[in-house]
Amino acid sequence: MIELAKRDIKSYVLRVGRLSKLQQRAVDTLSDQFCIPYDTKIINFEIIFGNTNPVIMEIGFGMGHATVEIAEKNIDKNYIALEVHTPGVGKVLSEIEKRNLTNIRIIQYDAVQVIRNMVPLNTLEGVHIFFPDPWPKKKHHKRRLIQNSFIKELILLIKKGGYIYVATDWEDYAQQIISVLTEFDELVNPFEGFADRIKWRPDTAFEKKGLAKNHIIRDIWVEIK
């Protein structure tokens, strides 16, 4: 368990979304197999997945379109997917069943608490944070997920040579993310700024909404030294 300064400000608002019948059935029948209940005990990835494949964590997968597509194309890797909203969890569970995926596990809980209390140190191959809530109003910037304190904890979980991959369509948030990541000597940015679009990252629903508003998509990729 990581013992660092706690951050009590939530980076999300828990909305009560309506589940489709398919999503509700998936939650009811598949949660025991593919969802990991939140706990304050460190989890064992080898036991959870039944193998020693590399583990990637995705934080805030929304409806999970990118999550399942990446997992399906990389069956030699395991994916821990974090999300607080039940409709997204139900959607991913239904896709797991539909695509016969065995390399995804879901934790439906606050990512800050999960990385602090459940993820073993120095075990992750990479972390994906695709289109986190931008909290666009200046008075709400303190709610943004990617802050110095959060990255400080996250780095401890990633193996040497691993990566953090962030994408956003909000320019000021992109600049903030670059600024935060630059503060850490443990991180190196091979692009020396914004990254080229990584070919294997699928489009997301939030990305399409941003493009419809003529927002520029920014990809940020850093690696652990």
Image: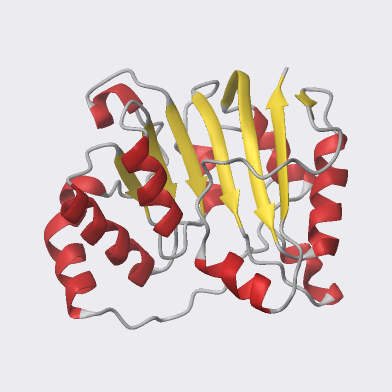
**Is residue 164 found left or right of 124 in the rendered image?**
right
Residue 90 visible? The answer is yes
- Please provide percent x and percent y for residue 120: 47, 26
* Outermost front residue: 199
| Total numbered labels | 0
Q: Is residue 224 positioned above or below 21 on the image?
A: above
Q: What residue is at 50 percent from the left and 27 percent from the top?
A: 124
- Please provide percent x and percent y for residue 214: 74, 74
Q: How is the image coloured?
A: secondary structure
- Please provide percent x and percent y for residue 60: 51, 57
- Quadrant of the rendered image containing residue 47: top left
Image quadrant in which the C terminus is located = top right
Q: What residue is at 39 percent from the left and 81 percent from the top?
A: 17
Camera-nearest residue between 43 and 5: 43
* Outermost left residue: 29
**Is residue 121 found left or right of 85 in the rendered image?**
right
Residue 38 visible? The answer is no
Q: What residue is at 35 percent from the left and 69 percent from the top?
A: 86
Q: What residue is at 66 percent from the left and 45 percent from the top?
A: 197
Q: Is residue 102 positioned above or below 63 on the image?
A: above
- Please provide percent x and percent y for residue 209: 60, 75
Q: Is residue 7 positioned above or below 56 on the image?
A: below
